Image (cartoon, coloured by chain):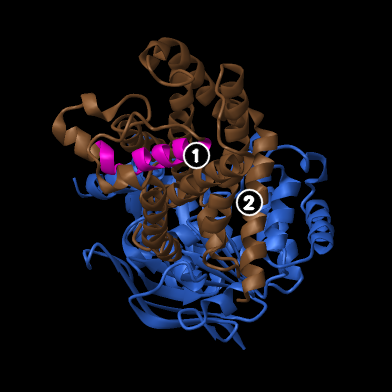
Chain colours: A brown, B blue
Amino acid sequence: MSAKNSVSDALVITKRQLQQLIRVPEVLIFNTIQPVMFVLLFRYVFGGLGAGIPGGYVQLLMPGIFVQTVTFTLAATAQGLAQDMEKGLIDRFRSLPISRSAVVMGRTLGDGLLNIVVLVVMGVAGYIVGWRPTANGFHIFLGFLMLLFFGYALSWCGVFAGLISKDARVVANVSFLFTFPLTFLSNAFASTTTMPKPLQYFAEWNPVSTMVAAARQLFGFHNTFGVTAHSYPSEHPIVTSLFYMVLLMAIFMPLSVRRYKSANNRS
Amino acid sequence: MKSVIAENLVKTYRHGEVKALDGLSLDVEEGTILGVLGPNGAGKTTSVRVLSTLLVPDSGRATVGGIDVVKNPQGVREIIGLSGQYAALDETLSGWDNLVMFGRLYHLSGEQARVRAQELLEQFSLTDAARRPIKTFSGGMRRRLDLAASLIIRPKVLFLDEPTTGLDPRGRMDMWGVIKSLVSEGVTLLLTTQYLEEADQLADDIVVIDHGRVIARGTSDQLKNQVGGERLEVVVAQNELVSAQAIIERVTGAVASVDTGLRKISAPVLTGTNALIDVVREFDTASIRPLDLALKRPSLDDVFISITGHAAEETEVETTTHKSKKKGGKK
């Protein structure tokens, strides 16, 4: 199996996902409406929390919601794969002479592309409600790139969850049960200093927090929601986040490919 | 030459608790159809999954087109087509998109994939529906498209796992037509089914499997002969059942089986139409008016029951009558 084939096989799978989006545009619409709704709700409900933040709450909120949104795509990845398993599509793919990584690679790539669209729409929505990054264009670009990469790394957890699950709806709900608290036990929406001590430690080391802090730094904001304990992750959010991403992928990429190879081996 | 060979395949689930395959061996001669016949849970799907490289057996050996399925699964995948029990297609995409996608995954160029998709859609009379999402297709159309997808590379060996399960009679007839036309093109086919009629209609050779092993093998005729020749079947009124049974047993010299629910008595006969004439004569003397009277060659259903002691279609209502027959008959 040549490397060229591996890539082109994966791209066929990605293309399939994009065709799905064209066939069922509702998916893309709801994928963007929900985060935009969060932007509006948080912006105007919690906007008052922003006393003392230069530029107001919305400046810190937007990176938080960006990270939350890409984190939530984990559930969509898991659900998509679990559905393919249920429909027997994974079996068919496995009976084809394609690279063993093609299907999972293609899926994560497709979810990554979807994230680009979602982030752009959210960025525009944020701008409309007053979000103004102060960093230069290159750093802002790096910020978004890192958000995408973070989402990509997480989607590998979703791939694995989808492949081990027996039911698409269950895996979507379970993924949500994990990702929802993860995004709130963080510095994404409020300062971690007001949390009980144990939660504070969790929030400091939470990959969501480090990613939010990294994004805030790259977008040019002072992260007043996290730098309390002077822990390593809150002092070096970019390095810590990159470490987390590499770690997640180092664990879940091989696990997922292995799982895909033996999928249904025990049914 | 044998296109498919399976030797002593064993596959257990849950640490040996469930034996899906228990030393299964079979082979398929090139250019022929082997029907693998068995009830639910007999190991039909598991054997197809092993032969199509989806499942690694615990022990045993299998080759497809001379290629070992465990040692070189990718080589096997390049020469097989697989169509499973459920149409494995992307439901949101159109038939056309699905076929082009699978064509690309078989490493056809974009142009080749489109040409092949068009050919297959025409061959399976799906051109009209080609641009519609699969979820709007009927069950029969889905199965045809699924079969089409498994034929993209003109596979040397085709595996069809219960191709007509769940289809209505018309869908089933259509599917049979399609499968028969494939056969005339010289495809080697392994087909599993729980429909005895289907194996009878389509297969050159039949293996009957139960509890993960082959319990009988032969052509449809051979299997039927194994059960014995013809059977006399008589349907009479409820109150005449006992006396009719006595007459039939006297004439045929065999033990008749009685289905009280259907009021049907049947018994093997060795003397053919002579037995029929004798029975009619005796009925006339006893003033029994049979509602139905026939001399039948055994169906594969009879074959199955005689080999396994239970009916093939566990889930169907007919089985319950068979069972109640056995119990009721003794009373």
Residue A60, quarter of picture: top left
Identify residue for label 1: B291
User: SS for tag 1?
Assistant: loop
Front in this rendered view, residue A184 or B182 = A184
Q: Is residue A267 visible?
A: yes
Image quarter of the C terminus of chain A:
bottom left
Q: Position of residue B70 (x, y in %)?
A: 45, 79
User: Where does the image place residue B128, in percent across and percent down from the top left?
Assistant: 82, 40
Quadrant, the N terminus of chain A: bottom right
Tell me: A137 left or right of A108: right
**Which numbered marker is on residue B301?**
none
Q: Amino acid at mark 2?
A: Thr
Which residue is at the front of the view, B326 or B257?
B326
**Direction from residue A118 to residue B324 in the image, left or right:** left
Please provide the residue range marked out in magenta: A203-219
Question: Which residue is labeled 2 in the image?
Answer: A14
- Name the chain letter of the residue that bears numbered label 2: A
Of helix, strand and loop, which one carries label 2? helix
Q: Is residue A13 found left or right of A210 in the rendered image?
A: right
At x 68%, y 66%, the residue is B106
**Residue depicted at x 49% and y 61%:** B300
Magenta segment: does it hold B314?
no
Residue drawn at x 69%, y 50% as measured from the top left = B98
Q: Position of residue A157 (x, y in %)?
A: 40, 50
Q: Is residue B84 visible?
A: no
Q: Is residue A55 left or right of residue A210?
A: right
CA distance for labels 1 and 2: 64 Å
- Residue shown at the point (25%, 34%) measured from the top left: A228
Principal secondary structure, stretch drawn in magenta: helix
Asked if marks 1 and 2 touch (Cβ < 8 Å), the reply is no
**Label 1 environment density (alpha carbons within 10 Å; few <14, some 14–19, many ≥20):** few
